[in-house]
Image (cartoon, helix red, strand yellow):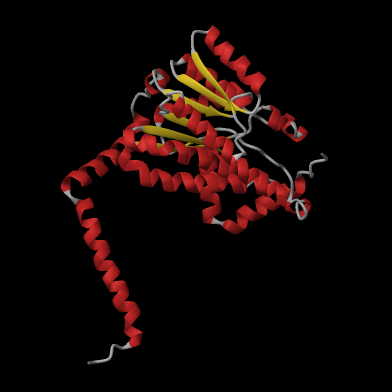
């Protein structure tokens, strides 16, 4: 028996895998599948040129889960989708705030269902998903808005690893856990939309926010992978690159008082814009410009960011 040259085994294995991959891709290139793919691309490309559908068309008669709904952006967005006819599931830790919000929506003729949940507790998220199912609520739209922001330089974080754990637990793991709990139903029904609220800072790489931006960047990476995998099931994923908003979370940094910022209502409209368009990304164009600038000249971008880091003082509290 002839001996196989050991140096050729890796190549042979790679060739076999390539042939296997080609056979598996073949059915995807069938005329029907190719037509579907081209149709989705054409629809997404033409969408900015076509009249935008109304928020009512996007959410009326559907169940929308809004996390972080007790105040600020989440509260404003919940009021808007409820006014558009959605059954709005509002989720947050604050029981009193959720009750007040649900009452306000009901008084305006809407339908709100409050669920008090700590979204940094994975067991609590599982219990929430189970309770929604037990209550007969078939979720069509999930908006992962709840988040924790920390502004602190890396130099001041050497002994504060827990900052990174806290932001990841809520901003990333909590959002992913809830998404994974609700996604199977969406895919089985071949309809759904997940909106993940990120931040403009992921695109601009704002100094002193390493813990916060890392958690949001992780969520964005998950979102892009999920969007690709779920496309054929007609489940869409959107990332909202939220700019600075006047909320209790931002008020903790006095420096922001002098900076332009959206109102919670305007930020809610940005989320509702994502619900209307189902686009992959929604947010100010300056974010895309920042990414292009960094891609063209990383050295120049880092110089600008380093100057900003030195010019803006460390938080005093």
Q: Which residue of the protein is positioned furthest toward the left in this rendering?
A: 31
Q: Quadrant of the C terminus?
A: top right
Query: Where does the image place residue 136, in percent across and percent down from the top left?
Result: 42, 24
Q: How many marks?
A: 0
Query: Where does the image place residue 218, in percent across and percent down from the top left?
Result: 55, 48
Query: Where does the image place residue 108, in percent across and percent down from the top left?
Result: 52, 8
From the viewer's perspective, is 255 left or right of 117?
Answer: right
Image vertical order of residue 157 relative to residue 240, above or below:
below
Q: Nearer the viewer, residue 29 or 118?
A: 118
> Is residue 207 in sight in this rendering?
no
Image quarter for residue 316? top right
Residue at image position (76%, 44%) is 312
Q: Nearer the viewer, residue 22 or 201?
A: 22
Q: Quadrant of the N terminus?
A: bottom left
> Is residue 99 in sight in this rendering?
yes
Q: Nearer the viewer, residue 223 or 273?
A: 223
Q: Nearer the viewer, residue 112 or 231?
A: 112
């Amino acid at each position: 028996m002839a001996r196989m040259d050991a140096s050729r085994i890796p190549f042979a294995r790679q060739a076999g895998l390539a042939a296997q991959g080609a056979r598996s891709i073949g059915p995807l290139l069938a005329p029907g599948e190719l037509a579907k793919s081209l149709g989705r691309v054409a629809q997404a490309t033409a969408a900015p040129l076509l009249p935008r559908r109304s928020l009512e068309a996007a959410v009326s008669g559907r169940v929308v889960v809004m996390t972080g709904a007790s105040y600020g952006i989440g509260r404003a967005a919940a009021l808007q989708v409820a006014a558009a006819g959605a059954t709005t599931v509002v989720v947050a830790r604050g029981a009193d705030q959720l009750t007040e919000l649900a009452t306000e929506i009901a008084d305006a003729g809407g339908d709100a269902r409050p669920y008090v949940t700590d979204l940094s507790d994975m067991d609590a998220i599982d219990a929430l998903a189970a309770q929604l199912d037990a209550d007969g609520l078939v979720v069509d739209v999930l908006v992962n808005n709840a988040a924790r922001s920390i502004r602190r330089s890396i130099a001041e974080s050497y002994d504060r690893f827990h900052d990174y754990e806290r932001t990841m637990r809520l901003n990333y793991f909590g959002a992913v856990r809830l998404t994974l709990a609700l996604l199977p139903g969406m895919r089985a029904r071949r309809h759904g939309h997940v909106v993940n609220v990120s931040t403009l800072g992921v695109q601009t790489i704002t100094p002193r926010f390493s813990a916060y931006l890392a958690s949001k960047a992780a969520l964005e990476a998950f979102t892009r992978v999920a969007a690709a995998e779920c496309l054929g099931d007609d489940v869409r994923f959107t990332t909202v690159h939220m700019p600075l908003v006047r909320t209790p979370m931002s008020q903790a940094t006095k420096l922001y008082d002098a900076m332009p910022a959206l109102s919670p209502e305007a930020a809610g409209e940005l989320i509702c814009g994502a619900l209307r368009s189902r686009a992959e990304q929604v947010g100010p164009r300056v974010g895309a410009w920042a990414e292009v600038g960094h891609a063209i000249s990383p050295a120049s971008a880092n110089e600008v960011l380093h100057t900003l880091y030195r010019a803006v003082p460390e938080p005093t509290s």
